Amino acid sequence: MFSKFDVIETIEMIEKEHLDIRTVTMGVSLLPCIRATARETAQAVYDRVMRKAEKLVPTAEELSSEYGIPIVNKRVSVTPVSLITAAFPEESAFVGQALDRAATDLGIDFLGGYSALVHKGTADYERAFLATIPEVLASTGRLCSSVNVGSSRSGINMDAVRAMGEIVVRTAQLTKEKDGLGCAKLVVFCNAVEDNPFMAGAFHGVGESDTVINVGVSGPGVVEHALKFIPDADLTDAAELIKRTAFKITRAGQLIAREAAKRLGAKFGIVDLSLAPTPARGDSVAHILETLGLEVVGCHGTTAALAMLNDAVKKGGVMASSRVGGLSGAFIPVSEDIGMIESAEAGAISIDKLEAMTCVCSVGLDMIAIPGDTPASTISAIIADEAAIGMVNNKTTAVRVIPAPGKNVGDEVSFGGLLGRAPVMPVHTGDASAFIRRGGLIPAPIHSFKN
């Protein structure tokens, strides 16, 4: 039962502390859409997505109005397109264009799933599919792409890692008029999950039901606000408060997820517990860490504070939902978090520190602008480093970096909206190209051998 104090507290969270449902994402299987030709498949894909997600936006708006909880994004994820176009991979762009057209016609924010899973090896059709990614992202507005290059069970496919460095550079070049915006829609994973509702990495796993609703909740501002009431508490008490707060946030997500699934005739998938920030002040994961006692995020102690935050969020949230999944933790995207932006502008945080932080939080190096002349081999090396963290620690990690064409360290890129803005950060200039050219497979760690 909800007491009047619960109701008042929830209203305050929404009005003053940026509590929202960050996304309601409908996953749609495209396996029934495979036809003899690319054009026929593309039309079948468009028709199916339009039919399945026809009521997604109005239903989310109805729920937001009824329950008084903002639902920021309405999204769709689909079966990895490389599987759908395996018979004609060079023509995968037809399906990509159809998906983007469907996203526009439905009025959703993003559609994810122009994706490939190549963590153990790259088949010929997947290699041809990967080559289409830059042009497709440059010619579409709402389509997102992801590629899984490693896992804790299979190791890291370094041939795919090398290819992805080149693909990131090519995507940036093709979208140079928009500061390399195409790269903001492209993420490279290790240990990608099938039920992630967040972009750019969402895709509908082949092990999922035909149509699924996954919800991502978010409330950095709520957590920060709560911590301000216990400025002198020890970290044990702070963790307990974060757990209780995460429970309340997740409870709202569980309610919306179940009701959305019911009204849309879909299966209820998962609630993702992630604290996803925005560029708005008062909605920052970095500021939570500073509220815990850090002068500026990036200083010594940041990784420890983030580890505590991430763990407490998961412990509190898991009790509030019957199905927890996705990425579930604290996100640290630079361009999408006002605290991270300010820290990067002040030179207080580096890519090296961000990499260390990814060992203890959700995902990885996210929405980081780097110099436009960064070599593809350096980007591949960044991807390899992050994939190694994921592989060895049996967690999901990812890289979404943006080599900003024509920009150097200290310049700024701006994408607007939730994608925000970011200063261009330096990368190491040491040459890793010989290492990347070796290719092959970095073997999985010994703990992968368990059955």
Image (cartoon, rainbow, N blue to C red):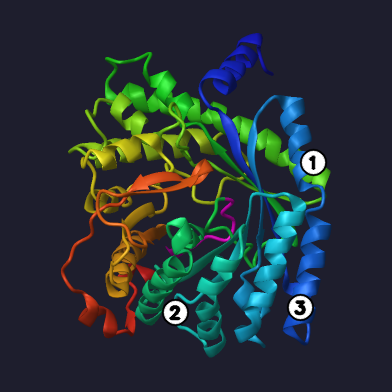
Residue matched to label 2: 120
Which structural element holds mark 1? helix
Q: Can the viewer see residue 102?
A: yes
Q: Quadrant of the C terminus?
A: bottom left
**Residue sitting at 45 percent across and 36 percent down?**
279
Across and down, in percent, residue 213 comes to: 70, 49
Across and down, in percent, residue 421 comes to: 41, 44
Q: Can the viewer see residue 445?
A: no
Which structural element holds mark 2? loop
Residue matched to label 1: 58
Across and down, in percent, residue 310 comes to: 39, 40
Among the two numbered marks 3 and 1 on one chain, the one whose residue lies closer to the N terminus: 3
Q: Is residue 342 left or right of residue 111?
A: left
Q: Is residue 71 above or below residue 224?
A: below
Q: Is residue 182 above or below residue 324?
A: below
Nearer the observer: mark 3 or 2; the answer is 3
Q: Marks 3 and 2, Cα distance to the nearest angstrom? A: 27 Å
Q: Is residue 409 left or right of residue 84?
A: left
User: Label 3 sits on what residue type?
Assistant: Thr
Q: Which span of residues is magenta-colored?
A: 188-197
- Dot 3, how many residues are within 10 Å of its Cα: few (below 14), some (14-19), or many (20+)? many
- Please tell me the numbered disc located at residue 41: 3
**Is 99 in front, or is 79?**
99
User: Label 2 sits on what residue type?
Assistant: Lys
User: Label 1 sits on what residue type?
Assistant: Pro
Quarter of image, res 294: top left
